[in-house]
Each structure stands twice: as structure tokens, then as C-alpha cells.
Image (cartoon, grey):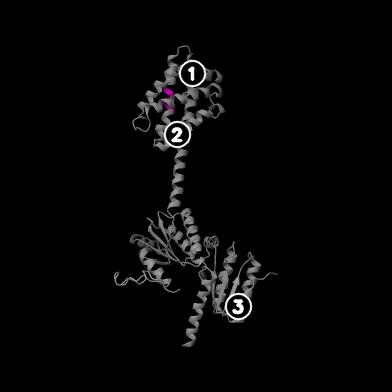
Amino acid sequence: MAANETTTLAALVGDNEKQIVPEWLELQKRAGVLQTGRITEAELASQSTDFLHLLRTGLATGGLDISNAAYTPAREFLGNLSRSRALQGFSPTETATFVFSLKQPLFNLLNRDKSIAPADAAKITWAVTTLLDGLGLLTFDMFQKSREEVILRQQREITELSTPVVKLWQGVLALPVIGTLDSERTQVVMENLLQHIVDEGAEIAIIDITGVPTVDTLTAQHLLKTVSAARLMGADCIISGIRPQIAQTIVHLGVDLNVISKATLADAFALALRRTNRAVVKLKSARTDNAKPKAPAEGGE
Amino acid sequence: MDRIPILKLGDALLVTIQVDMHDRLATALEEDLTSKIVAFGAKGVLIDISALEIVDSFIGRMLDNIAAVSRILDAETVVVGMRPAVAITLVELGLSLSGVKTALNVERGMALIKSRLEEFDADDED
């Protein structure tokens, strides 16, 4: 029975390929696939022809079960298609339309073919629907997956990019935090900072939160964790760049930061220099004092 | 039974932990250190844990206890050379060792204790 339907269907598709493709292309164009200019008509035509070919191969040996090995090339083709379309910025609907718009040409074909008994035609219609729905959902899955891959990759890149540890002076490190501090990032930031403290033998670490948009209780807790860990290693932490609104939020939330904090990175750096017995001195006159050492002058340790 | 050696260095005691700590060793160290502080009249205790790779809450508490006991006996505890991983573990365990002073290495820890001793000397002269 099922074999009967699929062979009829395979034969129908095989014999009428020339007829199906233009009709299918027309439908896709009407759906607006070409309007965005992300894909050319020639590309679309070759994609459509290739897919129909693979579908027929699948039908011929694999029946209606799209998880069958015979459908592997067709599945891979759809996977690549969804992936590339996801990257090109197609919407999920536009991507799935590629498969779903194939239904109508096939139904039309069935209608036109008078040699098929109505009962069989109904069965074949059902077979076509099941098959194309399955493949359509597959494109959805693949589309979603590739979008998620993109997001994941971006997330990783952001994490790597946004946690640099800067050496300001001998024994003074700065950590400009940019973006929201969540648990995962705190972990990365903390490990990074502590490792640098060991490598540089730093006594003071300045955590600058100018780039942190909001500070809630969780962020504050993460900051405190980082500060405590640095303290355990024997380095002092100064927090700088707390904006007025954030200062208010912290107080309203009742969070006790209990660490040295300064308004700006410059203030924090000045304190750090003082703590390490150094100072920034202004040169009296650039012309007369050529022999004098440049600021900031090193103090004895 | 193994014991961790406690070295006298002027007015300070130096403890270098170079083996993995187990609970009984930690308790023994706590007792030894207490009696040595009294015996030598030490003003500072330097604990070097740069070789310690694993800490648990028990060891963390031991460090806190030693600091508390030393403070009562008028000696300052400085823990030096903690590894990043150890620091993170202790923070995650909720042990911030607030009573303990810390330094990056033995040299800086010694400087910290020396500056305290100098304060004492200045007080004595008054």
C-alpha cells in the first residue's frame, strides 16, 4: 500500500520535474523570497532543482520515512540551506516556505493526472503532506540550531573580549568591567584577575565598573566575591567608576559593599600610587628642568 | 605522626605547609602553634600556603581559628601565597577569613609583620 503510493509519487515527481520546478519557483517568488535581494533567481532555481532531485532519490528507495538513510542527502541539503539562510538573515518563515511551497505544485500535478483513482489520489495527497511537513519541520530545527550556534559563539567572544586585565603601574592592576556581570562572567573575570595578580605580583587591583549598566544584589555579590578572593591572595581591591544612580541603587538595596571605592579610575589610581609609596609630581618647567626625572617619580619601597 | 615544622624567625613564627593537609594534621598544627606563640612570645605568625592545592572548609576554619587564637595571644597572623584556585574555593565556601591578614608572598608577609613590630617598638619608647 504505502509502497504503492510512494512509487506512484516517485514516478510522478520524476516524470514531471520540468513542470514542477517553474511552478514551485513562481510560488516562492510570490512569497517574496527574492524581494529582499539576499538570493538571486538563478541560485533559487538551482537550489530548487537540486532539492527536487534529492527528494526523488529519497522517495524511490526510502519510502515516506525521512529518517531513512535514503533521505540523508536531502536532509543534509536542507540543513546546509537552513544554515546559510539563517546566516544570511532570512526569517524562519521564509526558510520553511522553501519546503512548504512545494506542496501546491505536487497537488496540482495529482489533480491534472486523470489516470490516478480518487481514492489513491487522496492517499498520495496525505503522503505528500506528511513528507513535506516532516522536511519543513527539519528546516525549522536546523534554522533554530544554527541561530543558537551564532548566539553561543557571540557570547563566547563577548566573554573573552570584555575581561581584559590592564597593568597600570608596577604592582597596580586595573580591571575595566564592561557589560552585565553574571555568574559565568564573574567566574572568568575572577580567575583572570587572580592569575594576573600572581603573575605580576600586584599589590593593588582596581575594579572599574563604569561600563556596568546596572548593579543589583547579585552583581554586588559577585563583585564582593571577586574582592574577597583578591584579598585572600594578598592584594587590595579598589572599586571605581560607580555612577550616581548605581550608588543610589546600592544604598537602596541595602547592600553593604564594605570595600574601598572611588568615584573615578583616576582617583583610585592616585590612591593606589599613594599606597605603594609613589606619587605623580608636576614638573616645574619643561624647559629649565630637563634633568629632572619624569613623573610619576618612583618612591622607595 | 607527621607534624608541620614551626620555625622561629626573630619575633615571628614561620609555618610552611608543603603537604596536603588532613584534618588531624590541621588540629595538631593549631595546638603546636598556640603553645609556640606562648613559649617564644611571638608577635607575628606567617603561614605560607603556596604549596597547598586543595582546601576544604575545615582547613579554612583552621586558618580562621589560628588567627583568632593568635590575636588573643597578641600575635598577628599573615597568610601568604594563596593560589587563585584556592582563593576562589574559599570564597565560594563563604569563608572570607576576615580576621586574617594576607600577602602575596613570604617577603611581603614578612614586611607586614615587621611594620607591626616597628609600631610596637615605637609604642615601647613612648
Q: Which residue is outermost to the right?
A: B1
Separation (CA) of disc 1 from disc 3: 94 Å
Which of the 4 image quarters holds residue A258?
bottom left
Tell me if residue A14 can be seen. Answer: yes
Identify the residue under disc 2. Answer: A82
Q: Position of residue A106 (x, y in %)?
A: 44, 20
Given the image, on which type of amino acid does mark 1 rest?
Gly
Q: Nearer the viewer, residue B96 or A162?
A: A162
Disc 3: CA contacts within 10 A as few (<14), some (14-19) or many (>=20): some
Q: Position of residue A236 (x, y in %)?
A: 46, 67
Classify mark 1: helix, strand or loop. Answer: helix
Chain holding disc 1: A
Separation (CA) of disc 2 from disc 1: 25 Å
Does the magenta portion include A239? no
- Asked if residue A109 is positioned above or below residue A199 in the image, the reply reads above
In this rendering, would B42 be left or right of A289?
right
Magenta residues (range): A99-104
Earlier residue among tags 2 and 1: 1
The label number, if any, that marks residue A14 in the structure image: 1
Identify the residue under disc 3. Answer: B8
Q: Nearer the viewer, mark 1 or mark 3?
A: 3
Separation (CA) of disc 3 from disc 2: 72 Å
- Asked if residue B55 is positioned above or below residue A59 in the image, the reply reads below
Residue beneath the point at 47% across and 39% down: A145
- Asked if residue A108 is positioned above or below residue B43 in the image, the reply reads above
Chain holding disc 3: B
Classify mark 2: helix, strand or loop. Answer: helix
